[in-house]
Every structure is written in C-alpha cells, then in structure tokens.
Image: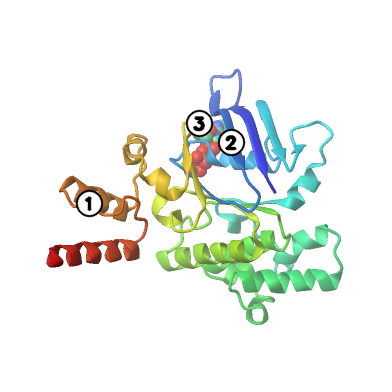
Amino acid sequence: MSIKIENLTYIYNPKSPFETKALDDVSLEIFDGEFIGLIGHTGSGKSTLTQHLNGLIKPTSGKIIINGLDITGTNVKLPEVRKKVGLVFQYPEHQLFEETVYKDIAFGPMNLGLSKEEVEARVKESMELVNLSYKALKDRSPFELSGGQRRRVAIAGVLAMKPEVLILDEPTAGLDPRARDEILEQIKYLHTIYKNTVILVSHSMEDIARLVDRIIVMHRGKVALTGTPRKVFRESATLEAIGLGVPQITYLMDKLKQRGIHLKDDILTVEEAKEEILKWIRGKENA
Ligand SMILES: Nc1ncnc2c1ncn2[C@@H]1O[C@H](COP(=O)(O)OP(=O)(O)OP(=O)(O)O)[C@@H](O)[C@H]1O
C-alpha cells in the first residue's frame, strides 16, 4: 500500500494557551512495500504523524491518501482503514487486557468477523512470527510474562490482523539490548516474507540503519531529511545540528577521513568497516 501525505499540519489545543504545532506542512510519499525508519528527537512529531495514518487523529489541514483513498474525507469508514493500517503504540503491552495470551491476540481477528478456525490459525501464525511458543503460552496470563514477551504478545495482536501497512512506534523502548535486537530482527524478517509496508519509529539511528530501505528524519514537526541510510548518514553535520548522532561506525569513518585515511564513503556496519580497513592495510603493505 502506498501512502501520500500532502501539506499535513496538526495543532494540539488550537487557540488556547497550550497550542502546539506538532506537524508543520509535512508532505511525503511512502511506496508500497517500503521499509521506512522514522527518526527524530522526542517531540519532533513522529507519533502525531503515525496516528494520522490510521485515522486516529484528523489533520488540522492537509490530506492523507492511502492507495488512492483520501482517509481524511468525511465519508471514509475508519474501521476499514484500520484493518489495513496496523499501529503498534509505544509500550503496547499497557493495552493488553484479556486474561489469556490467546484471547488477547484473537481479539482483533475476532472483530474482523473471521471463523473460529481462521482466528486460531492467525493466533498461531502471529505467535510464531514473534517467536512465542503457542503451546506453552497461549493459556497463560499476559501479566505473568516478561516485559519482552508481553511486548511480543502486543505486536502479535496487530500482526494477527494481517495489516498491509504495519506501523511500530518505538517497539523496543524500555527493553534490554537482547530483547531489542530480537524484536528488530523479527520485524525485518516479517518484512522480507510479507513485503508489506513497514514504518518503524525510533530515536536511534544505530538501531534501524541496518534494517530499513529509507530513513525519514523529523525535526520540529517538519521532514528534515529523507533518503537511504547511506545517503542520510552522509549528512552528519545536519544530523548533529538537530541533535541526532550518526552510528558510531560512521563517526569513526569520518574521523579516519579527517586524518587522511580515505575509505569507502558510506559504511554502515562494523563488518563493512573491517573489510575496508583490511583492504587499506593490505594496500599500505603492498605499496
Ligand atoms: N496529546 C497531546 N496534547 C498536547 N500536545 C501534545 C500531545 N501529544 C503530543 N503533543 C506535543 O506535540 C509535539 C509532537 O509530539 P509527538 O508525540 O508527536 O512527538 P514524537 O516525536 O513522537 O515524540 P516521542 O519520541 O517523545 O514520542 C510535542 O511538542 C508534544 O509535546
């Protein structure tokens, strides 16, 4: 599914002393099957933007067109939009409410009016996708599980709806590094098998650089930069000016360049850096 955002502005508490312009004339396009990383400082407008994409918030002005349909129009059926655009909120486990893992994950598909068998198949499949054992956990209370497992249950609940657009707002916030890496790898895996459109919101360049096709950087309610991770990381001065660091490896490569050691320009991972540095050493030895 493709998403087109045209001149989107959103103001919280308009015409009051608490008025805040959270989005300021944002225009951008997200293509079918893209894996997007939406990055920005706290308060830059990321959550406000994502909540517009399934109609949770109506724009102050501007349009959101999903697969050709303007979802800000008056006669649009928002439940239909929400079947297609799944949003995993920040700390989604706070919204778990059923007494068993099964019931929680089944809640969305049941509301779609699917048969009992289809609901069960979807619960099983989505639990497998987030690496939760169906057999061992389906009858447990979500509240007995670890933080990482509860997060997975909440993500599985959205996956069970089979959304064509999957939006995850800081899905790893508050998790330990291992749980964070596992969840990010699973999201990447999901995208490779389903080829759906994925928007992953994050504070951290480091976390998402390896995963996404394109990064959109938000700053004070506007799009500050957009492009492939390699292209965006070349803008290290702009990123630093808005208080977003580049991955450590990019920083290190910049420092080497300043000392006259010119390696490939757009290194993203430690493996690539290792290869380039070894190549450089071999070049020196043979010189
Ligand atoms: N419910 C609300 N009422 C009033 N102002 C709000 C509300 N939600 C967000 N804002 C303000 O809108 C601006 C954008 O906030 P938003 O939550 O969209 O940013 P964000 O980039 O998602 O931040 P974070 O990374 O902390 O989630 C901020 O100035 C924020 O204080």
User: Residue drawn 47% across and 48% down?
Assistant: 228
Residue at mark 3: 222
Residue 15: quarter of image: top right
Residue 150: quarter of image: bottom right
Sequence-first disc among 2 and 3: 2
User: CA gap, disc 1 to disc 3?
Assistant: 34 Å
- The secondary structure type at the circle numbered 3 is strand
Q: Which residue lies furthest to the front in this view?
A: 287
| In this rendering, position of residue 70 left or right of residue 196 | right
User: Residue drawn 51% across and 31% down?
Assistant: 221
Number of marks drawn: 3
| Numbered disc in front, either 2 or 1 | 1
Sequence-first disc among 2 and 1: 2
User: CA gap, disc 2 to disc 1?
Assistant: 35 Å
Residue at mark 2: 28
**Identity of the amino acid at label 1?**
His
Sequence-first disc among 1 and 3: 3
**Identity of the amino acid at label 3?**
Lys
- The secondary structure type at the circle numbered 2 is strand
Considering depth in this image, is 131 or 278 the residue closer to the camera? 278
Which mark is on residue 262? Answer: 1
